Amino acid sequence: MLAQRLTSPFDPAERLQVMILNLKPNFASGLLVLLLLLLTYGTNAQCDEKRVRKLTTTHLGEYSYETASFRPLSGFGNSRSIDAVFIAYGDEKYRVVNLSHGHSGEMVFQILDAKRNVIFSNEKSQSGDKHDFTAPTSGDYIIRFKYLTETKDGCVAFAIGYK
Amino acid sequence: MTSHPFLHRCCCWYLSNAVYQRRSSRAGIMGTMLVVASLVLGGCQDKDDTQNAQAGQDTSVVSETVITKAETQDFLHSLPNTLHLARMFKRTGMPYVTGLVHNTKVAQSYVDPTAQAINLGIYSADMGYAVLHNQNQEALKSLKAVKILADALQLNVLYDAGPWLGKFERNLNNSDSVLAIMAQLQMQSDLLLRDNARYDVLYLSFAGAYAESLFLATQLEKNHPNPALIKRISEQQLALGKLILLIEGLDDPERYMILLTDMKAIQDMMLKLDVGLAEKKPEKARQMALKELYPKVETLRKRLVAQS
Protein backbone atom coordinates (compact mmCIF):
# COMPACT_ATOMS: atom_id res chain seq x y z
CA MET A 1 0.00 0.00 0.00
CA LEU A 2 1.25 3.43 -0.87
CA ALA A 3 2.11 5.71 2.01
CA GLN A 4 0.71 9.15 1.28
CA ARG A 5 1.90 12.59 2.34
CA LEU A 6 -0.17 15.64 2.85
CA THR A 7 0.08 18.25 0.13
CA SER A 8 -1.86 20.74 2.20
CA PRO A 9 -1.68 20.39 6.00
CA PHE A 10 -4.81 22.47 6.42
CA ASP A 11 -7.21 20.45 4.30
CA PRO A 12 -9.17 18.15 6.65
CA ALA A 13 -10.57 16.14 3.76
CA GLU A 14 -7.09 15.43 2.54
CA ARG A 15 -5.96 14.56 6.07
CA LEU A 16 -8.66 11.92 6.26
CA GLN A 17 -7.79 10.59 2.83
CA VAL A 18 -4.15 10.17 3.82
CA MET A 19 -5.16 8.59 7.11
CA ILE A 20 -7.21 5.94 5.32
CA LEU A 21 -4.45 5.27 2.79
CA ASN A 22 -1.90 4.78 5.55
CA LEU A 23 -4.04 2.25 7.40
CA LYS A 24 -3.26 -1.42 7.04
CA PRO A 25 -5.95 -3.37 5.19
CA ASN A 26 -7.88 -4.49 8.17
CA PHE A 27 -11.27 -3.82 9.61
CA ALA A 28 -10.15 -0.44 10.93
CA SER A 29 -10.57 1.12 7.50
CA GLY A 30 -13.93 -0.56 7.16
CA LEU A 31 -14.98 0.82 10.51
CA LEU A 32 -13.76 4.26 9.57
CA VAL A 33 -15.89 4.15 6.46
CA LEU A 34 -18.82 2.87 8.52
CA LEU A 35 -18.39 5.98 10.65
CA LEU A 36 -18.41 8.08 7.49
CA LEU A 37 -21.55 6.34 6.33
CA LEU A 38 -23.31 6.95 9.61
CA LEU A 39 -22.30 10.60 9.66
CA THR A 40 -23.37 11.09 6.06
CA TYR A 41 -26.64 9.28 6.66
CA GLY A 42 -27.22 11.31 9.85
CA THR A 43 -26.74 14.56 7.97
CA ASN A 44 -29.03 13.44 5.15
CA ALA A 45 -31.74 12.12 7.44
CA GLN A 46 -32.12 15.43 9.20
CA CYS A 47 -34.04 17.39 6.63
CA ASP A 48 -35.97 15.14 4.31
CA GLU A 49 -39.57 14.49 3.38
CA LYS A 50 -39.92 11.23 5.30
CA ARG A 51 -38.81 12.65 8.61
CA VAL A 52 -40.84 15.83 8.25
CA ARG A 53 -43.94 13.88 7.18
CA LYS A 54 -43.67 11.66 10.24
CA LEU A 55 -43.23 14.66 12.54
CA THR A 56 -46.11 16.50 10.86
CA THR A 57 -48.50 13.58 11.27
CA THR A 58 -47.54 13.11 14.92
CA HIS A 59 -47.70 16.76 15.94
CA LEU A 60 -50.77 17.92 14.04
CA GLY A 61 -52.90 15.34 15.84
CA GLU A 62 -56.58 15.93 15.16
CA TYR A 63 -55.85 18.93 12.91
CA SER A 64 -55.94 18.46 9.15
CA TYR A 65 -52.82 19.16 7.14
CA GLU A 66 -52.67 22.73 5.80
CA THR A 67 -49.01 22.98 4.82
CA ALA A 68 -45.49 22.12 5.95
CA SER A 69 -42.04 23.21 4.91
CA PHE A 70 -38.44 22.33 5.66
CA ARG A 71 -34.91 23.45 4.72
CA PRO A 72 -31.39 22.86 6.04
CA LEU A 73 -30.60 25.75 8.36
CA SER A 74 -27.24 26.32 6.65
CA GLY A 75 -29.14 27.29 3.51
CA PHE A 76 -30.19 30.56 5.13
CA GLY A 77 -26.61 31.79 5.47
CA ASN A 78 -25.73 33.86 8.49
CA SER A 79 -29.31 34.89 9.21
CA ARG A 80 -30.08 34.60 12.89
CA SER A 81 -33.78 35.18 12.27
CA ILE A 82 -35.99 33.52 9.64
CA ASP A 83 -39.56 34.69 9.00
CA ALA A 84 -41.91 32.33 7.17
CA VAL A 85 -45.23 33.88 6.17
CA PHE A 86 -48.50 31.95 6.05
CA ILE A 87 -52.10 32.99 5.48
CA ALA A 88 -54.61 32.55 8.29
CA TYR A 89 -58.28 33.18 7.60
CA GLY A 90 -60.49 34.94 10.14
CA ASP A 91 -62.44 32.66 12.53
CA GLU A 92 -60.52 29.57 11.39
CA LYS A 93 -58.79 27.32 13.91
CA TYR A 94 -55.11 26.58 13.38
CA ARG A 95 -52.31 24.62 14.93
CA VAL A 96 -48.74 25.71 14.18
CA VAL A 97 -45.89 23.41 15.21
CA ASN A 98 -42.16 23.89 15.17
CA LEU A 99 -40.55 20.77 13.70
CA SER A 100 -36.98 22.08 13.60
CA HIS A 101 -34.44 19.55 14.73
CA GLY A 102 -30.78 18.59 14.74
CA HIS A 103 -29.33 22.02 15.58
CA SER A 104 -26.98 22.55 18.47
CA GLY A 105 -27.79 26.16 19.38
CA GLU A 106 -30.61 27.73 21.31
CA MET A 107 -33.67 28.77 19.32
CA VAL A 108 -36.77 30.88 19.97
CA PHE A 109 -39.92 30.00 18.03
CA GLN A 110 -42.56 32.71 17.71
CA ILE A 111 -45.83 33.35 15.90
CA LEU A 112 -46.85 36.88 14.95
CA ASP A 113 -50.33 37.92 13.89
CA ALA A 114 -51.32 40.05 10.90
CA LYS A 115 -50.53 43.21 12.90
CA ARG A 116 -47.08 41.91 13.87
CA ASN A 117 -47.99 41.26 17.52
CA VAL A 118 -46.28 38.22 19.02
CA ILE A 119 -49.13 35.82 19.82
CA PHE A 120 -46.90 32.92 20.79
CA SER A 121 -43.35 32.41 21.97
CA ASN A 122 -41.90 29.09 23.11
CA GLU A 123 -39.90 30.99 25.74
CA LYS A 124 -43.07 31.50 27.77
CA SER A 125 -45.03 28.49 26.64
CA GLN A 126 -46.01 25.45 28.67
CA SER A 127 -47.07 23.58 25.53
CA GLY A 128 -43.61 23.44 23.96
CA ASP A 129 -43.31 24.27 20.31
CA LYS A 130 -46.98 24.06 19.45
CA HIS A 131 -49.65 26.73 19.32
CA ASP A 132 -53.40 26.37 18.75
CA PHE A 133 -55.36 29.51 17.97
CA THR A 134 -58.37 30.95 16.19
CA ALA A 135 -57.37 33.71 13.79
CA PRO A 136 -59.22 36.91 14.68
CA THR A 137 -58.77 38.36 11.19
CA SER A 138 -57.58 37.17 7.82
CA GLY A 139 -54.05 38.12 6.90
CA ASP A 140 -50.40 37.24 6.67
CA TYR A 141 -49.15 35.65 9.87
CA ILE A 142 -45.49 35.00 10.58
CA ILE A 143 -43.60 32.04 11.98
CA ARG A 144 -40.28 33.36 13.32
CA PHE A 145 -37.24 31.21 14.10
CA LYS A 146 -34.66 33.17 16.12
CA TYR A 147 -31.30 31.53 16.74
CA LEU A 148 -29.69 32.91 19.87
CA THR A 149 -26.34 31.25 19.31
CA GLU A 150 -24.46 30.84 16.07
CA THR A 151 -25.40 27.54 14.49
CA LYS A 152 -25.60 26.30 10.95
CA ASP A 153 -26.45 22.67 11.49
CA GLY A 154 -29.82 20.99 11.55
CA CYS A 155 -33.12 21.48 9.88
CA VAL A 156 -35.58 24.34 10.16
CA ALA A 157 -39.13 23.08 9.68
CA PHE A 158 -42.74 23.77 10.56
CA ALA A 159 -46.22 22.42 9.91
CA ILE A 160 -49.63 24.05 10.00
CA GLY A 161 -52.95 22.31 10.54
CA TYR A 162 -56.55 23.49 10.49
CA LYS A 163 -59.82 22.32 11.96
CA MET B 1 -31.42 15.08 0.88
CA THR B 2 -28.33 17.19 1.27
CA SER B 3 -25.05 15.42 1.79
CA HIS B 4 -22.24 16.95 3.76
CA PRO B 5 -19.67 18.14 1.19
CA PHE B 6 -16.65 17.13 3.25
CA LEU B 7 -17.84 13.59 3.90
CA HIS B 8 -19.12 13.38 0.39
CA ARG B 9 -15.74 14.31 -1.03
CA CYS B 10 -14.04 11.69 1.15
CA CYS B 11 -16.47 8.99 0.02
CA CYS B 12 -16.02 9.81 -3.66
CA TRP B 13 -12.26 9.82 -3.25
CA TYR B 14 -12.28 6.50 -1.34
CA LEU B 15 -14.37 4.85 -4.01
CA SER B 16 -12.17 6.02 -6.86
CA ASN B 17 -9.00 4.88 -5.03
CA ALA B 18 -10.45 1.52 -4.11
CA VAL B 19 -11.33 0.81 -7.72
CA TYR B 20 -7.98 2.08 -8.98
CA GLN B 21 -5.92 -0.02 -6.56
CA ARG B 22 -8.16 -3.12 -6.96
CA ARG B 23 -8.24 -3.69 -3.24
CA SER B 24 -8.98 -7.28 -2.45
CA SER B 25 -8.83 -7.34 1.31
CA ARG B 26 -11.98 -7.88 3.30
CA ALA B 27 -11.67 -4.41 4.78
CA GLY B 28 -11.30 -2.89 1.35
CA ILE B 29 -14.34 -4.71 0.03
CA MET B 30 -16.34 -3.86 3.09
CA GLY B 31 -15.25 -0.23 2.94
CA THR B 32 -16.08 0.01 -0.73
CA MET B 33 -19.52 -1.50 -0.17
CA LEU B 34 -20.21 0.95 2.64
CA VAL B 35 -19.08 3.90 0.59
CA VAL B 36 -21.24 2.79 -2.34
CA ALA B 37 -24.19 2.61 0.04
CA SER B 38 -23.30 6.03 1.40
CA LEU B 39 -23.18 7.51 -2.09
CA VAL B 40 -26.48 5.93 -3.02
CA LEU B 41 -28.02 7.52 0.07
CA GLY B 42 -26.38 10.88 -0.38
CA GLY B 43 -25.84 11.01 -4.14
CA CYS B 44 -22.34 11.44 -5.58
CA GLN B 45 -23.10 14.96 -6.69
CA ASP B 46 -24.85 17.29 -4.33
CA LYS B 47 -28.49 17.48 -5.43
CA ASP B 48 -28.74 21.21 -4.86
CA ASP B 49 -25.65 21.85 -6.93
CA THR B 50 -27.11 19.77 -9.75
CA GLN B 51 -30.38 21.65 -9.61
CA ASN B 52 -28.63 24.99 -9.65
CA ALA B 53 -26.55 24.00 -12.60
CA GLN B 54 -29.62 22.76 -14.47
CA ALA B 55 -31.89 25.59 -13.59
CA GLY B 56 -29.34 28.38 -13.79
CA GLN B 57 -31.20 30.10 -10.98
CA ASP B 58 -29.98 32.73 -8.57
CA THR B 59 -28.49 31.07 -5.54
CA SER B 60 -27.74 32.06 -2.01
CA VAL B 61 -24.38 30.45 -1.36
CA VAL B 62 -23.71 30.08 2.30
CA SER B 63 -21.27 27.97 4.23
CA GLU B 64 -21.89 24.40 3.10
CA THR B 65 -25.42 24.20 1.75
CA VAL B 66 -26.56 25.85 -1.44
CA ILE B 67 -30.26 26.51 -1.80
CA THR B 68 -31.92 28.11 -4.76
CA LYS B 69 -33.97 31.28 -4.75
CA ALA B 70 -37.06 29.16 -5.50
CA GLU B 71 -36.36 26.95 -2.48
CA THR B 72 -35.93 29.96 -0.20
CA GLN B 73 -39.10 31.62 -1.49
CA ASP B 74 -41.02 28.38 -1.05
CA PHE B 75 -40.03 28.20 2.61
CA LEU B 76 -40.71 31.87 3.30
CA HIS B 77 -44.14 32.05 1.59
CA SER B 78 -46.63 29.29 2.31
CA LEU B 79 -49.70 28.83 0.17
CA PRO B 80 -52.94 27.83 1.85
CA ASN B 81 -54.47 24.41 1.41
CA THR B 82 -57.10 24.24 -1.34
CA LEU B 83 -59.12 21.60 0.51
CA HIS B 84 -59.30 24.06 3.40
CA LEU B 85 -60.49 26.78 0.99
CA ALA B 86 -63.25 24.45 -0.23
CA ARG B 87 -64.26 23.82 3.39
CA MET B 88 -64.39 27.54 4.15
CA PHE B 89 -66.51 28.19 1.06
CA LYS B 90 -68.83 25.37 2.05
CA ARG B 91 -69.24 26.77 5.58
CA THR B 92 -70.71 29.93 4.08
CA GLY B 93 -73.56 27.79 2.75
CA MET B 94 -72.23 27.22 -0.75
CA PRO B 95 -74.33 24.43 -2.31
CA TYR B 96 -73.37 21.57 -4.65
CA VAL B 97 -74.54 21.99 -8.21
CA THR B 98 -74.02 19.19 -10.70
CA GLY B 99 -72.41 19.93 -14.04
CA LEU B 100 -70.15 22.71 -12.80
CA VAL B 101 -66.99 20.63 -12.32
CA HIS B 102 -64.50 19.94 -15.10
CA ASN B 103 -65.20 17.12 -17.56
CA THR B 104 -63.14 14.11 -16.41
CA LYS B 105 -63.32 12.48 -19.85
CA VAL B 106 -60.83 14.93 -21.30
CA ALA B 107 -58.07 14.28 -18.72
CA GLN B 108 -56.09 12.19 -21.20
CA SER B 109 -56.14 14.89 -23.86
CA TYR B 110 -53.68 17.19 -22.05
CA VAL B 111 -50.22 16.73 -23.53
CA ASP B 112 -48.40 19.88 -22.45
CA PRO B 113 -46.85 19.46 -18.96
CA THR B 114 -48.02 22.94 -17.88
CA ALA B 115 -51.61 22.09 -18.85
CA GLN B 116 -51.26 18.69 -17.18
CA ALA B 117 -50.09 20.22 -13.88
CA ILE B 118 -52.80 22.90 -13.93
CA ASN B 119 -55.57 20.43 -14.72
CA LEU B 120 -54.29 18.04 -12.08
CA GLY B 121 -55.01 20.88 -9.65
CA ILE B 122 -58.41 21.54 -11.20
CA TYR B 123 -59.50 17.92 -10.79
CA SER B 124 -58.14 17.89 -7.21
CA ALA B 125 -60.33 20.90 -6.36
CA ASP B 126 -63.34 19.22 -7.98
CA MET B 127 -62.62 16.13 -5.92
CA GLY B 128 -62.59 18.19 -2.71
CA TYR B 129 -65.80 19.98 -3.66
CA ALA B 130 -67.55 16.66 -4.36
CA VAL B 131 -66.33 14.94 -1.17
CA LEU B 132 -67.36 17.87 1.01
CA HIS B 133 -70.88 17.56 -0.41
CA ASN B 134 -70.97 13.76 -0.08
CA GLN B 135 -70.81 13.29 -3.84
CA ASN B 136 -68.27 10.52 -3.56
CA GLN B 137 -68.92 8.85 -6.92
CA GLU B 138 -68.20 12.20 -8.57
CA ALA B 139 -65.13 12.53 -6.39
CA LEU B 140 -63.89 9.12 -7.53
CA LYS B 141 -64.15 10.21 -11.18
CA SER B 142 -62.06 13.28 -10.37
CA LEU B 143 -59.48 11.16 -8.52
CA LYS B 144 -59.14 8.91 -11.58
CA ALA B 145 -58.51 12.03 -13.69
CA VAL B 146 -55.92 13.15 -11.12
CA LYS B 147 -54.19 9.78 -11.44
CA ILE B 148 -54.09 10.01 -15.24
CA LEU B 149 -52.40 13.41 -15.06
CA ALA B 150 -50.09 12.40 -12.20
CA ASP B 151 -48.91 9.47 -14.34
CA ALA B 152 -48.52 11.75 -17.39
CA LEU B 153 -46.31 14.07 -15.31
CA GLN B 154 -44.33 11.02 -14.15
CA LEU B 155 -45.12 11.78 -10.55
CA ASN B 156 -45.40 8.03 -10.01
CA VAL B 157 -41.62 8.20 -9.62
CA LEU B 158 -42.31 10.20 -6.45
CA TYR B 159 -45.48 8.58 -5.22
CA ASP B 160 -47.81 5.90 -6.48
CA ALA B 161 -51.39 7.15 -6.72
CA GLY B 162 -52.64 3.57 -7.19
CA PRO B 163 -52.89 2.57 -3.50
CA TRP B 164 -54.61 5.89 -2.76
CA LEU B 165 -57.24 5.09 -5.36
CA GLY B 166 -57.85 1.74 -3.66
CA LYS B 167 -58.11 3.35 -0.22
CA PHE B 168 -60.49 5.95 -1.61
CA GLU B 169 -62.76 3.31 -3.19
CA ARG B 170 -62.87 1.22 -0.02
CA ASN B 171 -64.01 4.26 1.99
CA LEU B 172 -66.43 5.74 -0.53
CA ASN B 173 -69.34 5.62 1.88
CA ASN B 174 -67.54 7.45 4.62
CA SER B 175 -66.89 11.10 3.75
CA ASP B 176 -64.77 11.72 6.87
CA SER B 177 -62.44 8.87 5.94
CA VAL B 178 -62.27 10.08 2.34
CA LEU B 179 -61.40 13.58 3.52
CA ALA B 180 -58.69 12.17 5.80
CA ILE B 181 -57.29 10.16 2.87
CA MET B 182 -57.31 13.28 0.69
CA ALA B 183 -55.46 15.26 3.35
CA GLN B 184 -52.82 12.52 3.66
CA LEU B 185 -52.39 12.34 -0.12
CA GLN B 186 -52.03 16.11 -0.28
CA MET B 187 -49.43 16.11 2.49
CA GLN B 188 -47.41 13.37 0.84
CA SER B 189 -47.44 14.94 -2.61
CA ASP B 190 -46.68 18.44 -1.23
CA LEU B 191 -43.67 17.26 0.76
CA LEU B 192 -42.35 14.99 -1.98
CA LEU B 193 -42.63 17.72 -4.61
CA ARG B 194 -40.72 20.04 -2.25
CA ASP B 195 -38.10 17.41 -1.46
CA ASN B 196 -37.57 16.87 -5.18
CA ALA B 197 -37.69 20.60 -6.04
CA ARG B 198 -40.65 20.13 -8.42
CA TYR B 199 -41.89 23.63 -7.68
CA ASP B 200 -43.32 24.06 -11.17
CA VAL B 201 -45.76 21.19 -10.60
CA LEU B 202 -46.44 22.34 -7.03
CA TYR B 203 -47.40 25.90 -7.99
CA LEU B 204 -49.12 25.18 -11.29
CA SER B 205 -51.32 22.52 -9.73
CA PHE B 206 -52.07 24.94 -6.91
CA ALA B 207 -52.96 27.58 -9.54
CA GLY B 208 -55.36 25.10 -11.15
CA ALA B 209 -56.97 24.12 -7.84
CA TYR B 210 -57.19 27.73 -6.75
CA ALA B 211 -58.76 28.89 -10.04
CA GLU B 212 -61.25 26.03 -9.92
CA SER B 213 -62.24 26.77 -6.30
CA LEU B 214 -62.72 30.41 -7.21
CA PHE B 215 -64.68 29.48 -10.33
CA LEU B 216 -67.05 27.23 -8.36
CA ALA B 217 -67.53 29.86 -5.65
CA THR B 218 -68.18 32.73 -8.06
CA GLN B 219 -70.56 30.69 -10.24
CA LEU B 220 -72.55 29.65 -7.21
CA GLU B 221 -72.57 33.10 -5.63
CA LYS B 222 -73.83 34.57 -8.89
CA ASN B 223 -76.94 32.39 -8.70
CA HIS B 224 -77.26 32.15 -4.91
CA PRO B 225 -76.31 35.60 -3.49
CA ASN B 226 -74.20 35.09 -0.39
CA PRO B 227 -72.39 38.01 1.38
CA ALA B 228 -70.31 35.64 3.56
CA LEU B 229 -69.05 33.88 0.45
CA ILE B 230 -68.22 37.22 -1.20
CA LYS B 231 -66.12 38.09 1.86
CA ARG B 232 -64.20 34.80 1.56
CA ILE B 233 -63.73 35.35 -2.18
CA SER B 234 -62.28 38.83 -1.60
CA GLU B 235 -59.80 37.40 0.95
CA GLN B 236 -58.32 35.19 -1.73
CA GLN B 237 -56.20 38.09 -2.97
CA LEU B 238 -53.78 37.14 -0.15
CA ALA B 239 -53.14 33.70 -1.62
CA LEU B 240 -53.09 35.04 -5.15
CA GLY B 241 -50.36 37.54 -4.26
CA LYS B 242 -48.18 34.72 -2.91
CA LEU B 243 -48.89 32.45 -5.87
CA ILE B 244 -47.88 35.19 -8.33
CA LEU B 245 -44.66 35.79 -6.38
CA LEU B 246 -43.82 32.09 -6.32
CA ILE B 247 -44.53 31.50 -10.02
CA GLU B 248 -42.46 34.56 -10.91
CA GLY B 249 -39.61 32.99 -8.92
CA LEU B 250 -39.66 29.82 -11.05
CA ASP B 251 -37.11 29.20 -13.72
CA ASP B 252 -38.21 30.87 -16.98
CA PRO B 253 -41.37 32.59 -15.65
CA GLU B 254 -42.05 34.04 -19.14
CA ARG B 255 -43.54 30.65 -19.98
CA TYR B 256 -46.40 31.47 -17.63
CA MET B 257 -46.90 35.07 -18.75
CA ILE B 258 -50.56 34.65 -19.83
CA LEU B 259 -51.45 32.94 -16.58
CA LEU B 260 -49.61 35.61 -14.56
CA THR B 261 -51.32 38.45 -16.44
CA ASP B 262 -54.76 36.93 -15.81
CA MET B 263 -53.98 36.33 -12.15
CA LYS B 264 -52.71 39.88 -11.63
CA ALA B 265 -55.90 41.30 -13.17
CA ILE B 266 -58.00 39.12 -10.84
CA GLN B 267 -55.89 40.17 -7.86
CA ASP B 268 -56.52 43.87 -8.66
CA MET B 269 -60.27 43.24 -8.83
CA MET B 270 -60.21 41.32 -5.55
CA LEU B 271 -58.41 44.19 -3.86
CA LYS B 272 -61.10 46.58 -5.12
CA LEU B 273 -63.75 44.19 -3.84
CA ASP B 274 -62.01 44.04 -0.45
CA VAL B 275 -61.99 47.85 -0.27
CA GLY B 276 -65.66 47.92 -1.31
CA LEU B 277 -66.55 45.48 1.49
CA ALA B 278 -64.58 47.54 4.02
CA GLU B 279 -66.82 50.49 3.17
CA LYS B 280 -69.72 48.38 4.43
CA LYS B 281 -71.58 48.52 1.15
CA PRO B 282 -71.90 44.81 0.38
CA GLU B 283 -74.53 45.23 -2.31
CA LYS B 284 -72.38 47.74 -4.17
CA ALA B 285 -69.38 45.44 -3.78
CA ARG B 286 -71.39 42.50 -5.04
CA GLN B 287 -72.51 44.38 -8.11
CA MET B 288 -68.93 45.31 -8.83
CA ALA B 289 -67.81 41.70 -8.40
CA LEU B 290 -70.52 40.45 -10.72
CA LYS B 291 -69.61 43.01 -13.32
CA GLU B 292 -65.81 42.79 -13.24
CA LEU B 293 -64.39 39.92 -11.21
CA TYR B 294 -66.66 36.99 -11.99
CA PRO B 295 -66.35 37.17 -15.81
CA LYS B 296 -62.58 37.41 -15.44
CA VAL B 297 -62.50 34.27 -13.28
CA GLU B 298 -64.69 32.51 -15.84
CA THR B 299 -62.34 33.50 -18.67
CA LEU B 300 -59.30 32.27 -16.72
CA ARG B 301 -60.94 28.93 -16.00
CA LYS B 302 -61.98 28.53 -19.64
CA ARG B 303 -58.39 29.18 -20.69
CA LEU B 304 -56.99 26.70 -18.18
CA VAL B 305 -59.26 23.78 -19.11
CA ALA B 306 -58.85 24.35 -22.86
CA GLN B 307 -56.77 21.63 -24.50
CA SER B 308 -53.87 23.16 -26.34
Image (cartoon, rainbow, N blue to C red):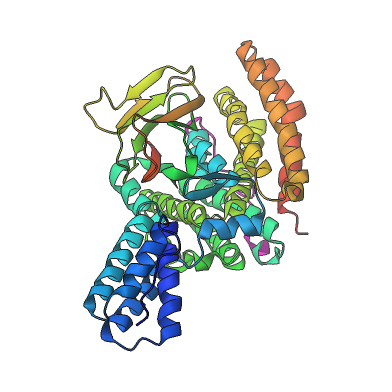
Q: Is residue B40 magenta?
A: no
Specify start and end residues of the magenta stretch as a single range: B91-106
Q: Residue at x 58, y 66 (%)?
A: B148
User: Where is the N terminus of chain B found, in terms of image quarters?
Assistant: bottom left
- Residue that appears at 34% across and 32% down: A149
- Point out the image quarter for the C terminus of chain B: bottom right
Check residue B99 for magenta coloring. Answer: yes
Residue at the location (43% across, 55% down)?
B188
- Count of all numbered marks drawn on residues in the image: 0
Q: Majority secondary structure of the magenta segment?
A: loop
Instruction: Where is residue B144? Give x, y as percent.
Output: 54, 63
Q: Say whether residue B119 is visible.
A: no
Taking the view exactly as shown, the residue that stands out farthest to the top is: B279
* Residue B259 vs residue B295, the one in the foreground: B259
Q: Is residue B268 visible?
A: yes
At 21% from the left edge and 27% from the top edge, which residue is drawn? A126
Give x and y (percent) for residue A101.
32, 44
**Residue B66 horizontal/vertical position (percent):** 52, 49
Q: In the rendered image, which quarter is residue A8 located in?
A: bottom left
Q: Position of residue B91 (x, y in %)?
A: 47, 32
The residue nearer to you, when weighing B182 against A9, is: A9
Q: As rendered, which of B199 and B213 lies closer to the eye?
A: B199
- Above or below — where is A105 with respect to A58? above
